Amino acid sequence: MSSGGVGGGSLGAGLPYHKFVSFALEETRLRTTLTPHPSQEKFKSIKPNDDNTVFNALSFSAPKIRLLRSLTIEKKNSYQVLDFAAFSEPEYDLPIFCANVFTTHAQSIVVLDLNPLYDTTVHKDYKDKYYRSIMPLVHKYNELLPWGGKITSESLKFFSPIVIWTIFESTEHNHHVLHSAFVDYYKVWLELMDQAIKENNKATIARNQEEQHKYLTWRAEKDPGYPLLKKLIGESRAEDLVMEFLFEGVNTLGTKSFLDYFPEYARDDGSVNKKRSMMGKSFETRPWDANGEFIGDAEAQ
Ligand code: BLA
């Protein structure tokens, strides 16, 4: 399968991330009805400036799902990207499914998680509700997909105790393991989605919506993929892609600004500090124990 001399073979003919996306869509269709999201029309045929790069963008919604969207990018003989996410309607407090992979011949940078809508170190009830029963997933993948080392500290509050944050050598074997983890995590998310019961309390719905908006606001401003997107399609198209496709809802789900949510990024002149991180990197090892208790405080200080 390896295309001779390009390394682990994972960047050969059979584009691995299309397989991830088609699995997820098929599996979703077994449980619900997907309708194309309005953003799909505008973004499905993005053409990058360079002929060697292909973008594939798909977006849908479903009765409980506000937005399920997928972006894959392939630059021939260079790198591949998967950015897949699913956001529920605010009547549900479901975690946000998040699969991000940046793969070169040498290595793959991976975040795979059911990102919590509410910070699990603060909201123990939320942690128990969604993560207590699925903690065994960590044990299943901890050795095969080990903790990727120090990470932008701000990311941690958007991660759950089951997050897979890893950097691995781009081999076929490692991609098989990643695929298996993606399948497991996505099936868990679908099961949670199936079981989710609609919230009727207006204040709770508003709170869910604000938390989702905060998440979208963070990622739309500080996502590590943003600089590369700007390079590939130019600043204004990258901004459209981020605001109206990847993190669609950032302009409609709430009115608070980035600095309202993250005041520590304010510069003296009132603008947003362009630095990705104010806190720097930390957490050399996995900062949760097997029960999902956060144990990273000492190290972060
Ligand atoms: C790197 N992407 C990273 C890193 C993380 C993530 C944690 C390592 C660097 C760091 O510590 O920040 C991903 N971080 C996330 C995710 C969340 C988060 C998913 O906080 C969610 C809350 N990645 C993409 C896309 C591209 C991409 C679409 O998702 C490119 C178009 C590229 N990610 C990319 C690149 C790097 C990276 C190039 C390495 C460069 C860097 O570290 O800045």
Image (cartoon, grey):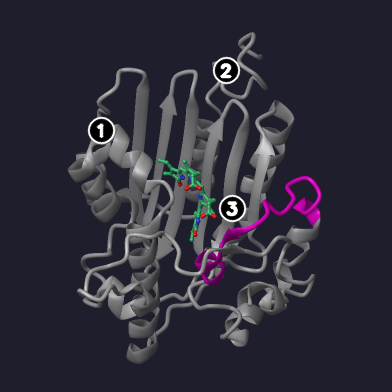
Count numbered badges in the picture: 3
Residues at discs 2 and 1 in contact (Cβ within 8 Å): no
Amino acid type assigned to the residue bearing label 2 in the image: Gly
The three-letter amino acid code for the residue at tag 1 is: Ile
Helix, strand, or loop for circle 3?
strand
Is 107 on the left-hand or right-hand side of 272? Answer: right
Q: Quadrant of residue 10?
A: top right
- What percent of the width, then of the height, locates residue 137? 74, 59
Whichever of labels 1 and 3 marks the residue nearer the N terminus, that label is 1
| Extent of the magenta region | 140-158
Circle 3 is placed at which residue position? 112
Q: Is residue 191 left or right of residue 70?
A: right
Residue topped by disc 1 = 46
Rendered residue at 41%/32% (across/down): 73
**Residue 101's x, y, as percent?**
53, 42
At a point 55% along the width and 34% down the height, the residue shown is 103
Q: Residues within 10 Å of mark 1 (few under 14, many from 20)?
A: some
Quickly name the residue at label 2. Answer: 12
58 within the magenta span: no
Q: Which mark is residue 116?
A: none
Q: Secondary structure at mark 2?
A: loop
215 and 25: which is toward the camera: 215
